[in-house]
Image: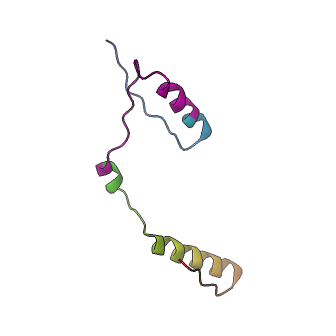
């Protein structure tokens, strides 16, 4: 059996379409998704951190003092 390893950027529509096509052939294609260890190595944000950042950007851009509820 000959195999090849491929990385597909699935953030856009073309990559998602290609992934769906590959998923239609499970007998010849095996898909491995990133493990939780790969994800945990990246910076993640809490809901509070995200909304706080959005508040800061909105208020600085529009010169307002809006408080978001989260």
The answer to whether 63 appears left or right of 21 in the picture is: right
User: Seen from this angle, which residue lies furthest bottom?
Assistant: 65
In magenta segment, residue 24 = yes
Instruction: Please tell me which residue lies in front, 7 or 48.
Output: 48
In the rendered image of this protein, does residue 57 appear above or below residue 17? Answer: below
In the rendered image of this protein, does residue 27 appear above or below residue 53? Answer: above
Residue 54 at x, y percent in the picture: 57, 73
* Label total for image: 0
Residue 28 at x, y percent in the picture: 40, 18
In the rendered image of this protein, does residue 13 appear above or below residue 51? Answer: above
Q: How is the image coloured?
A: rainbow
Figure quadrant of the N terminus: top left
The answer to whether 36 appears left or right of 47 in the picture is: left
In the rendered image of this protein, does residue 59 appear above or below residue 14? Answer: below
User: Seen from this angle, which residue lies furthest right?
Assistant: 62
User: Seen from this angle, which residue lies furthest top?
Assistant: 1
Residue 39 at x, y percent in the picture: 35, 52
Q: Please report the residue visible at 46 percent of the width from the left and 21 percent of the height from the top.
A: 25
Q: Please report the residue visible at 59 percent of the width from the left and 42 percent of the height from the top.
A: 12
Residue 9 at x, y percent in the picture: 50, 39
User: Seen from this angle, which residue lies furthest left?
Assistant: 37
In magenta segment, residue 20 = yes
Q: What stretch is highlighted in magenta?
A: 17-37
The answer to whether 4 appears left or right of 56 in the picture is: left
Q: Where is residue 2, by image quadrant?
A: top left
């Amino acid at each position: 059996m000959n195999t090849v390893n491929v990385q597909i950027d699935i953030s856009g529509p073309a990559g998602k379409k290609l992934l769906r096509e590959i998923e239609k052939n499970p007998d010849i294609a095996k898909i491995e998704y990133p493990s939780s260890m790969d994800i945990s190595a990246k910076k993640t944000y809490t809901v509070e951190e995200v909304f706080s950042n959005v508040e800061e950007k909105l208020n600085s851009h529009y010169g307002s003092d809006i408080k978001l509820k989260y």
